[in-house]
Image: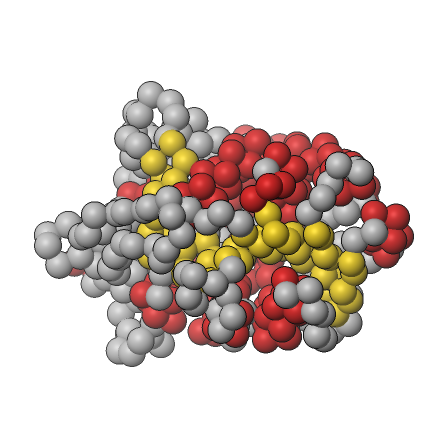
Amino acid sequence: MNTTATFYSLWMLSSCSLAPNPSKKMAAILHITSLQSNTPSFLLHSLTPSPPSLRHSSLKSKGHILFQRRKRSIAFTCQSISDDGDDGYLLDAPVSAGDGFSFSGGKYSDGPNPADEWFKTGKYMKAHPVYGTGEKAKDPIFGLTMGGNSQTSTDLFRWFCVESGNADKPSVVLIHGFPSQAYSYRKVLPLLSKDYHTIAFDWLGFGYSDKPQPKYGFDYTLDEFVSALGSVIDELGVNKVSLVVQGYFAPIVVKYASKHQEKLNDLILLNPPLTAKHANLPSTLSIFSNFLLGEIFSQDPLRASDKTLTSCGPYKMKEDDAMVYRRPYLTSGSSGFALNAISRSMKKELKNYVEEMRKILMDDDWKVKTSICWGQRDRWLDFDGVEDFCTASKHRLVELPTAGHHVQEDLGEELATVIAGLVSRKVRI
């Protein structure tokens, strides 16, 4: 192994955000990745570059953000780049803008960018109070200033969500898994919204929602996510709601639901971690929690988005979809910092949360109608034990033979039909 090459690559990574071209960052990350298996442990642990933080300004709504407690459509506006002098999400900014990432001349430079198109369909809402001193996260030694949405506001966090359907109809909230975005439900939303008021949101740390740095208002513990979910549901102003949640965020939603059963009509779990074997994160995810390498890999858009979505099932990403998932990691380093923090919390707390979820769903006091949809081609979570659990707990099991861990990606249209059937008490598969 060439020690000089490794020093050079780590130096590239620590200073890459000073360059206007994102390819330099990617080259450094990919080079370090390729050397990982041959790098002596003493070298990796002795060289700890500060994770690059890429400047990107906070998006501000021109309209006043407004919510009413009675059930109605979410009322607020958003924009990709403000035209009133304030900085916006510079998703396709020229080099002169100084954001460090220009995609000029790329595939999407002259036409509609799928990330921009998805962003236009959503809105921002404010929910969950910001705790702490209100201090601004300090800039890293190397790299540009912290991204705008990595800094906490003084009141409430901003959540990106997509709302569809008539607000007078029964409400269904679609909750993405770890790691993913509300975008994963893009095929479910239009079909489900024909008969239901449907909302999908990005968790804090993902997609276009705020990504506060740990110790500056949100530390990404699982208990904090439970509390944050409660704030979101309350802010939506719905009396009763059906919750659909996928993957490793299921235990968080179940814990919330156990304290608020009166607010739920239905609970639908998509490939949740149900058994003791499920309580350990797969290596694809646990790598983000590792010392040094986790900080580096969480800044790699290909590893943080493409690999995590395609390694857990049969899902084949189209380039348009890949660009949406990659974009938060290309625009700012804050997505990577959040991924690193969440991975550490999951690795530390997931086992207890899975055990608690099992007890809640098996308890005689659990009154919420619960269904479990399982993609049989899940490469992360083994189906062994799932059927026995559903039989013992008397919860409905819906098997989807051709889907993987991210059911909504593999069978979006079919899943919309299944959800509609379960919520209406009629399963149509």
**Which of 165/274 is in front?**
165
Q: Is residue 337 above or below residue 418?
A: above
| Residue 288 point in image, percent of width and height | 58, 44
Residue at the spot 64% in from the left edge and 65% down from the top edge: 424
Q: Nearer the viewer, residue 12 or 62?
A: 62
Q: Position of residue 182 (x, y in %)?
A: 48, 58
Relative to residue 218, is residue 15 depicted above or below?
below
Where does residue 46 sit, x and y in percent of width and height?
Answer: 54, 30
Report the residue at 79% width, 53% height from top. Answer: 395
**Count of picture labels:** 0
Residue 400 pos. (x, y %): 74, 69
Display colour scheme? secondary structure
Say left or right for 157 vs 200: left
Q: Is residue 335 visible?
A: no
In the drawing, does residue 282 fall left or right of residue 159? Answer: right
- The one of 30 and 352 positioned closer to us in this rendering: 352
Quarter-wise, where is residue 356 in the image? Answer: top right
Q: Residue at x 77, y 47 (%)?
A: 274
When asked about the image quadrant of residue 83, the answer is bottom left
Q: Quadrant of residue 315?
A: bottom right
Q: Residue furthest left?
A: 85
Residue in the image at 46% along x and 54% along y: 201
Residue ranking furthest to the top: 133
Residue 64 at least partly seen: yes
- Say which quadrant the C terminus sits in: bottom right
